[in-house]
Amino acid sequence: MSSSPTTPPPSPTATVQESGPSNRYLLVFGGIMLVGILILAWIGKPPRAVTIGKPLPELDLQALLDNTSPTSNAELKGKLVVLHFWGTWCGPCVKEFPEFAKLAAQYADSDQVKFVSISCSGGAEYDLDQLRSETVNFMSKIPNPIPTYADPAAMTRERVAWILPRGSLGYPTTLLVDRDGTIIDLIEGYYPGEMEKLATEIERKL
């Protein structure tokens, strides 16, 4: 008498395939999300380490407004220096400049701190008369207008750009330089509250 064939039990491999999705996919997805968040954070506020500690490049500035005296690296030696690159055409600059001017006014009579405002166009200033006119018009609306310079051939901006995190200078950009001519703080872009932090750093260095 022959026996009837029996159905073999399902293999372990088949059982695994019929289970729910592997946690591995969730881990991969979570990893991708984390990398994306880190990239966005880096884009939003780039690292400053490549700039901090570098010497201030040679300045090539020209007095733009009547209340502005000539300046150079040698004349700035021995002082805390705040260099502020901005433009009247730049929305974030327009928002930040009143805060910058207010901070500069606090040290207007100080011989230890020098604020250097640099009014810029999008490139080299081939028409200084137009830049001067636009800057004067803008300053007329500021409660605390301050001495302001031009960077006629854009040489100062080019030299500064070389030591910035991305190799380019955006607007606004602010540098704090110590008495030895070394950059000790960098602000790229406009972030509410940054001028207050800068004031604290200035007081700490005085």
Image (cartoon, rainbow, N blue to C red):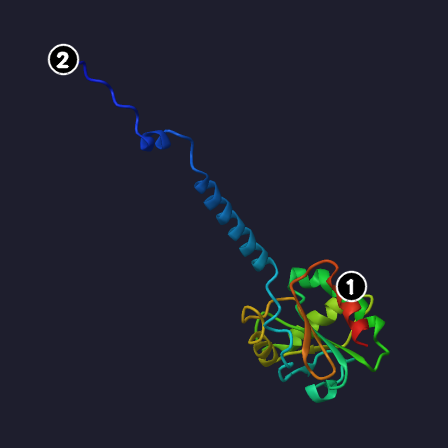
Does residue 76 show up? yes
* Residue at the outermost right position: 109
Circle 2 crowding by C-alpha within 10 Å: few under 14, some 14–19, many from 20: few
Q: Where is residue 147 in the image (x, y as percent from the top left)?
A: 76, 77
Does residue 153 show up? no
The residue under label 2 is which amino acid type? Answer: Ser
* Residue at the outermost bottom position: 74
* Of residues 148 and 189, the one drawn nearer to the viewer in this rendering: 189
| Mark found first going from the N terminus, 1 or 2 | 2
Between disc 1 and disc 2, the foreground one is: 2
Which residue is pictured at 56% across the width and 77% down the height? Answer: 158
Q: Are marks 1 and 2 in contact (CB under 8 Å)?
A: no
Residue at the spot of label 1:
196
Residue at the spot of label 2:
2
* Residue at the outermost front position: 1
The residue under label 1 is which amino acid type? Answer: Glu
Q: Is residue 127 left or right of residue 65?
A: left
* Of residues 194 and 99, the one drawn nearer to the viewer in this rendering: 194
* Displayed quadrant of residue 113: bottom right
* Of residues 96 and 141, the one drawn nearer to the viewer in this rendering: 96
